[in-house]
Image (cartoon, rainbow, N blue to C red):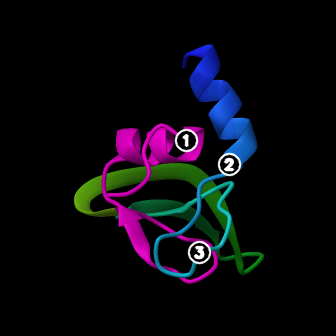
Amino acid sequence: MSVKEEVIKRLIGNPRCPKCNSEITWLRNYQSGKMYYMFDPENSSIYEENEFQADSKVNYYNCPQCAEILFTDEEKALKFLRGDLSGR
């Protein structure tokens, strides 16, 4: 980002949601896939294995305030948060 772009970003602030106009500092990411757990029948406890295998069925980034889906591409979502991209 050039010096001019950085100054403009500081003046404008964080990006805003195009639907609700809320200031956005982070996005929610939803992905479909499989999460694996361990079940211990003796203690009736479920332990998270921390193993998530994403599939390509669902992957989107939405506004944390109004839940509007803003992006389906991680690179565009990151650019938006950095102020490099204003919309879809």
- The residue singled out by tag 3 in the image is 21
Amino acid type at mark 3: Asn
Do callouts 2 and 3 mark residues in contact (Cβ within 8 Å)?
Answer: no
Separation (CA) of disc 2 from disc 1: 9 Å
Specify the quadrant of the image occupied by residue 74. Answer: top left
- Circle 2 or circle 3, nearest the eye: 2
- The magenta stretch is 60-88
User: Label for residue 12?
Assistant: 2
Q: Position of residue 44 (x, y in %)?
A: 72, 81
Residue at image coords 51%, 49%: 51
Do callouts 2 and 1 mark residues in contact (Cβ within 8 Å)?
Answer: yes
Residue 9 visible in image: yes
- Circle 2 or circle 1, nearest the eye: 2
Residue 79 within the magenta-colored segment of the rendering: yes
Q: Secondary structure at mark 2?
A: helix
Q: Earlier in the sequence, mark 2 or mark 1?
A: 2
Most foreground residue, 37 or 66: 66
Q: Position of residue 67 (x, y in %)?
A: 51, 80
Amino acid type at mark 1: Gly
Most foreground residue, 45 or 22: 22
Q: Position of residue 5 (x, y in %)?
A: 58, 27
**Relative to 23, is 56 on the left or the right?**
left
Q: Quadrant of the N terminus?
A: top right
Most foreground residue, 13 or 28: 13
Separation (CA) of disc 1 from disc 3: 15 Å
- In this rendering, the answer to whether 67 lies above or below 79 is below
Q: Earlier in the sequence, mark 2 or mark 3?
A: 2
